[in-house]
Amino acid sequence: MSDTTPDIIYTKVDEAPELASASFLPIIQKFASAAGVSVGTKDISLAGRIIATFPDHLTEAQRQNDELAELGKLVKTPEANVIKLPNISASVPQLVAAVKELQAQGYALPDYPDAPETDEEKAIRAKYDSIKGSAVNPVLREGNSDRRAAVAVKKFAQANPHRMGDWTADSQTRVASMSSGDFFSNEVSATLPAETSARIVHVAEDGTETVLKDGLSYPAGTVVDATYMSARALDAFLEDEIAKTKDEGTLFSLHMKATMMKVSDPIIFGHAVKAYLKPVFEAHGDALKSLGVNPNSGLGDLLERVKDNAEIKAAIDKVMAERPPMYMVDSDRGITNLHVPSDVIIDASMPALIRAGGKGWGPDGKEADANCVIPDNSYAPVYDETIRFFKENGKLDPATAGTVQNIGLMAQKAEEYGSHPTTFEIPADGTVKMVLADGSVLHEHQVETGDIWRSASARKAPIEDWVNLAIDRQKAEGCEAIFWLDESRAHDAELIAYVRPILEAKGVADRFRIMAPRDATRATLETITKGENSIAITGNVLRDYLTDLFPILELATSAKMLSIVKLMQGGGLFETGAGGSAPKHVQQLQKENHLRWDSLGEFCALGESLQFLADQTGNAKAKVLGKAVDAATQGILDHGRSPSRKVGEPDNRDSHYWFARYWAEALAAQTDDAEMAAHFDPVAEALGAREEQIVTELAAAQGSPADLGGYYHTDPEKTAAVMRPSATLNGIIG
């Protein structure tokens, strides 16, 4: 790599993973330097991205480069070697909270405009909107996903099975989704025969034409979709499901992805808030509007805005008493499923509910069955079939279950997760058309005011790379492999037209099955119940959903998965797992100075990154380091050195001490490089000899509130003091 680019980039992110980095990264950098390997950072945190977006509002000392853009360029080079930790995919409430925190710290940032009117406000809103949601992953994921449980992690989970909730045949928990009028039923798709540009146009009933998006560009072979969700059908569906939930006596729960799907899902979330409080909006609509209420921001924001209006508060209390009880994020604090769009994220919330035997927490602090409302029917069948399977067969046994690997199509903003710039809430009845450069209409829909229209695409090169990656993985594993594609779905039919010829040309068609998601779910659960393994080959959204669902059932968490992105230009991106529970971890640290975040995902990614670097550059010492990382990771598992959840017991910082010790011991004992062994022998000896002092210093830090200097934008010195409290360990590491 260049003289100024580190050999490995370790991303600076948010919340618990970033706090853990303050403890772990100095260890990585110290050990790596012995092999001549440099490890640097790039800031892709929410706060960092906000600061980089508004340089004109800040002092010279406050400004920072757009390091996400810099990384976006790097991942398109063969030299890229990036360890990516989970970052915040910000909802509007999170974005606003981060801005307020930065403003309080002296950053003269503009407020987030809820309802921009002037050109300046619209420009500010556009800049902020470019930050929210999944703004990071589409930039960095210039390759497809190979995600699986590391062998050591899977063996440990089988030897130490986690607790699973019991399923019974009479469970009332179910999944509800729309049977018509949703994205699934309205989807159309086509593969472009030649390179072209396109624009998206809305034509109102009076003939007024508005260009919603211009300048789209697609290479030959791109699969381009278009679809919409009917607002009228959505509202009718939600109203019906609220009534059914009341009759059934279960919890009402909405499961969305308002972070990644940053345009469509917050709107759908807002429809649910309005449906649940329909009588309040009907009686007090004007007053709510004057108070700046936006249902898309959630019930929590609404309650804050009406807190001084006794009449509206009373109306809300009356309606909520009459409605079915809600699935709760935090029963003790009264935080409901509908409070904040980013609080209940489907790929984390549904597996957690399924693992618990179909139970969710109600407002009374007790567990109950739930109606799991997933409006769009594209992927709801996966969860529906999983629930049906466990009702029929009982809970999964983690001690004997096989494992599900995933090969996911996600490169170059593939599929729905790349659709943010081409998703629109329709302003008036009329028609939406996707018009190509030659004037022909590729896709067309009749729409009504408030409908949500979107277009997504997947390019030819990523699709072909995805299929070939699946072939390689199946050859390596020799197990069942299924393409989760539905021939009756427009988009999937276009993908199948790519998949089958490649499989046939490679002579491996008999090694793969192509199944609709519902059928693939049933087949995969049957396979792992027998203790056998399966490879799920999926599109982008299912990649996200399944790499939480199956790991949470198998391992109790998705944060311990090995996630390798083989970048299409030859580099490597090594992801460290999910961060959905990170906010609760930070809250506990702030309150009790105990961080329960488990860095096992970081350990696994580090080992892969070092060995990839060794293969790419011929650095034999990096290979030795990488092998020793695997030994250290095994040591953490074998000796039970992962963090505890309770204050006063070993936490994340303790696990980093033990990892450093096991890593040093493995390096000192290895015989491939005498120089490295001699270098780490005194380190290993010091870490072992001073165990009692180090552990005592780490334990002494716990129990009192921790001051980080912020939540989204922490103070580096304060954070280092909190996360590196052992002077003895710091002295050894340097």
Image (spheres, grey):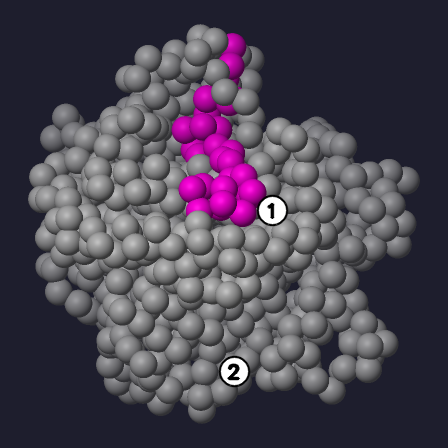
The numbered disc on residue 533 is 2
Q: Is residue 443 left or right of residue 685?
A: right
Q: Residue at x 24, y 65 (%)?
A: 360
> Could you tell me which secondary element the residue under label 1 belongs to?
strand
The mark found on residue 540 in the picture is none
Q: Position of residue 327 (x, y in %)?
A: 24, 58
Q: Is residue 271 above or below residue 508?
A: above
Q: Is residue 1 visible?
A: yes
Considering only vertical position in the picture, is 520 above or below 585? below
Q: Residue at x 9, y 39 (%)?
A: 704
Q: Which residues are magenta?
A: 29-56
Residue 621 relative to residue 496: left or right: left
User: Which residue has dot 1 on it?
Assistant: 81
In the rendered structure, which amino acid carries the disc numbered 2? Asn
Left or right: where 122 falls relative to 362: right
Tell me which residue sits at (85%, 50%) in the image: 220
Q: Amino acid at mark 1?
A: Asn
The image shows residue 466, relative to residue 733, as above or below, that is below
Residue at 26 percent across and 62 percent down: it is: 641
